[in-house]
Amino acid sequence: MKVKHMVDPSKKSFWHHTKQDMEQEVITITLWPYRSLGRRGYLYLMTGFIGLIFILSLLFYTLGAWPVIGFLGIEVGLVWLIFRVNYNSGRNYEQIFITADKTSIEKVSWRGKTHRFDISSAWIAAKCIKANGQSDKLLLTYHSKQLEIGKFLPPREKFSLAIALNDSFERMRGAT
């Protein structure tokens, strides 16, 4: 079974479902973090921010407080670094492969490090639980174990994903 790892963060939904036509049916669901600010928006934001800092630098220079200019430069560097870290975390994704025999979950970090979990499809179920003071959790339960998926998804998407996963699990159980 050969599966291409295709992640398209430009899609509007937070998760995506595909069905591949093969000898054995495989349902593939890909999850990725949502980023509301695209590359063009980031360019505009940073250009405006650097322009504002430049104007403030000129103001402080004319007032005789020229040492402040160095701190404003550090501020630009920190904002750039924070956005860089945020965009790196946006490259995380998870893929769920559901077959009649097993369900495989592949979690890929922004550095490319992969964690893979294989679970028997006969024993798996998805549920969304409320956490006290925190965001909802989407859990895959099997036997007495639990695996949290989609930590980066907003709470409203976790519930609909749990329903879609349970429908996929039932469909695959019926295929055997």
Image (cartoon, grey):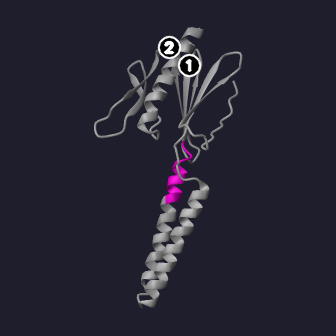
Residue 63, above or below 110: below
In primary-sequence order, the first of circles 2 and 1 is 1
**Mark 1 and mark 2 in contact (Cβ < 8 Å)?**
no
Residue 37, above or below 95: below
What predominant SS class does the magenta segment belong to?
helix
Query: Can you say which quadrant of the picture contains the N terminus?
Result: top right
Task: Pick the residue in front: 94 or 115.
Answer: 94
Most distant residue in the left direction: 132
Indicate the amino acid at tag 2. Answer: Ala
Q: Position of residue 67 (x, y in %)?
A: 43, 85
Indicate the amino acid at tag 1. Answer: Lys
Residue drawn where x is 53% and y is 72% of the image: 50
Q: Which contiguous range is marked in magenta? A: 83-92
Residue at mark 2: 122
Residue drawn where x is 60% and y is 43% of the image: 9
Residue drawn where x is 54% and y is 19% of the image: 168
Mark 1: which secondary structure?
A: strand
Q: Position of residue 65 (x, y in %)?
A: 41, 87
Residue drawn where x is 46% and y is 26% of the image: 162
**Which quadrant of the view contains residue 22?**
top right
Q: How many marks?
A: 2
Q: Is residue 145 left or right of residue 96?
A: left
Q: Position of residue 172 (x, y in %)?
A: 57, 14
Q: Is residue 97 left or right of residue 163?
A: right
Q: Residues within 10 Å of mark 2 (few under 14, many from 20)?
A: some
Residue at mark 1: 102
Q: Is residue 148 visible?
A: no
Q: Is residue 48 visible?
A: yes
